[in-house]
Amino acid sequence: MGLSHRIKSFLDDRFDTATARTIIDQQAHKRLPPHTSWFHVFGSLSLLLFVSQTITGILLLVYYRPTPEDAHQSIQYITAEVHFGWLYRQIHAWGATLMILVVLLHMLRTYFHGAYKKPRELTWITGVLIFILTITFGFTGYLLPWNQIAFWATTVGTESANKVPYIGGWLRYLLRGGDAVTGETLSRFFVLHVIILPWLLTGLVVIHLLLMRLNNLTTLERVGEEKPVPPDSGIPFFPVHVAKEGVVAVLLLAVLVTLSVLAPWEIGEPADPLSTPPHIKPEWYFLPSYQLLKYFEGPYGAMIGIVACSVPFLLLFLWPFLDRGKERHPRKRPLAVAFGVLGLVAALFLGYLGHISETEQTFFGKRYHIDLLGWPHEIVEEQGDAEQAH
Amino acid sequence: MTNTEKHPTRRGFLDWLIGIGTSVTGLAMAVPALMYLWPAARTGGSDNVEVEGASDMAPGQSKTVQVGGKAVIVVRSHGGFEAYSAICTHLGCLVQWDGTKRQFLCPCHAAAFDAQGRVVSGPPPAPLPPYRVKEVAGKVYVSPT
Ligand code: HEM
Ligand code: FES
């Protein structure tokens, strides 16, 4: 008797394995709706990236030390000395950015297919929570190398919390573990990043996937008129959809390794609490909010700004209950589609303004200084020495 | 109406007891845990700090020191020393002293404060708070006002 056979009969003697096998079989061969396409792979890609972050994160943890004295040094040690340390650090850093991107693409797919409508409102809401946790992962992880950019970006980021009406001051104090960003902040962010967020996200993803399976993927039929996909039609999850996912997963891993090799993240200078370097900007996924905040000035303005930044997230949570239309097909929901496109364009535009603000850019052959708010000011050259027009 | 709803039964009482008991126990465990997370009062270093090498500073020069865990910028003018909080009141970056412009400049969003810490331009909502400077026997000390 072969080993696998012996294990099988050992289990069969003790448990009701037939039932378990039926459930697994049903799930594996479940039929997905006929329009299930390459756009439907972003969910499992998000999952793949989460798994990759978990594995590379655990590997980094072996050598990383979360104190202001050791943190920067330990990252340098990982990249310079540890076998393949550079690779795992790069894959973890690039994986974070790609995960946020892929989760965003997944949200767009489900938005345009009306997948948030009844009965999948809770799938969508757990999704929005997952999205928020994912960017919180990014925010907390960013500080861990304890370099200048991270230290000051975190100072600015946690200071923004101070503008939250009424509780801002407490919130900042709690986040920082004191008045300023110090070793206390590093400890807090570390615990969030490696213990609390991973378990929260794991729990949410499990619920999200269960809900997704219970309702199956959405067809493009109207709310209340969805027909179940019979076993002899639709797209078999295994092997057809899984094969698509496999192809895209391999591509994604290739992109991840390529970026890690060709565009490595720098370690930067160690944090210096007594000097702020120029050009502090947050990561790309915070740029739209960061830019939006700049347009609200003064003590009350700043408060309104923070509230304005939370509106998009509030809208995401409430969206299944705000859009009560019965149609799912994007061509039959011009308003919802227009709204989604508008939101996307606004976010991209604000992010771009944030990216180019306080830099010099060339448009149509002329040099411009882009100010804080994103306005361009032409740079006029006068007798050889450059001077700003405004 | 069933019997259960009119007269509390043993079953109903047990349900109620378990519900209340779990909530109270949960709360009793959560409150200290939340308090634990609140940063314990901790002085971030001394409150009266000597500015090392102050006597070597030329007029127009500045130095950033930590007072009670917060960054303070000390400027030497012709009249003597002045100190202001170096923490930009906008989003917390540290300002630098520009001796020629006689202004504190913030590297983060291009704010400028004048020599008295008042906002000249940029997004900060409030002036830089001043610190007290004392000169004793040729040494310069900074402390919160
Ligand atoms: C780590 C993050 C995430 C993972 C691992 C994940 C995983 C998945 C997977 C594997 C699917 C099924 C395949 C697919 O439709 O792509 C799915 C479906 C779904 N997800 Fe996510 N997801 C994540 C984040 C999100 C976010 C941020 C949202 C929205 C705000 C969201 C909303 C949905 C919805 C509504 C469905 C049902 C789709 C349908 O019925 O067609 N998910 N998720
Ligand atoms: S932090 Fe100084 S101007 Fe924004």
Image (cartoon, rainbow, N blue to C red):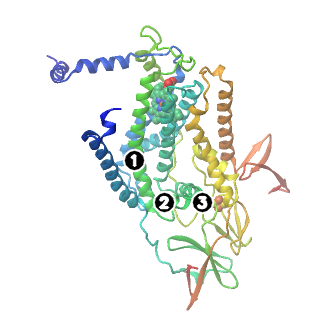
Left or right of A125 in this view: A84: left
**Disc 3 or 1, which lies upstream in sequence?**
1
Look at the image and tell me in which quarter the C terminus of chain A lies. bottom right
Q: Quadrant of residue A302?
A: bottom right
Q: Are marks 3 and 1 on the same chain?
A: yes
Check disc 3: other Cα within 10 Å, few if <14, some if 14-19, many if 20+: some
Q: Position of residue A313 (x, y in %)?
A: 58, 41
In whole angstroms, how far apart are the C-alphas of marks 3 and 1? Answer: 31 Å
In whole angstroms, how far apart are the C-alphas of marks 2 and 1? Answer: 17 Å
Q: What amino acid is at disc 1?
A: Ile
Q: Are marks 2 and 1 on the same chain?
A: yes
User: Pointer 2: what residue?
Assistant: A176
User: Pointer 3: what residue?
Assistant: A277
Q: Is residue A40 visible?
A: yes
Q: Please state which of residues B33 and A191 is positioned toward the viewer in this rendering.
A: B33
Discs 2/3, front: 2
User: Mark 3 falls on what kind of element?
Assistant: loop
Is residue A362 depicted above or below B72 in this figure? above
Q: What amino acid is at disc 3?
A: Pro
Q: Please state which of residues A86 and B72 is positioned toward the viewer in this rendering.
A: B72
User: Pointer 1: what residue?
Assistant: A196
Check disc 2: other Cα within 10 Å, few if <14, some if 14-19, many if 20+: many
Q: Chain of mark 1?
A: A
> Which image quadrant shows ligand 2?
bottom right
Check disc 1: other Cα within 10 Å, few if <14, some if 14-19, many if 20+: few
Q: What amino acid is at disc 2?
A: Arg
Q: Please state which of residues A229 and A326 is positioned toward the viewer in this rendering.
A: A326
Q: Position of residue A157 (x, y in %)?
A: 56, 54
Residue depicted at 27% across the width and 21% down the height: A20
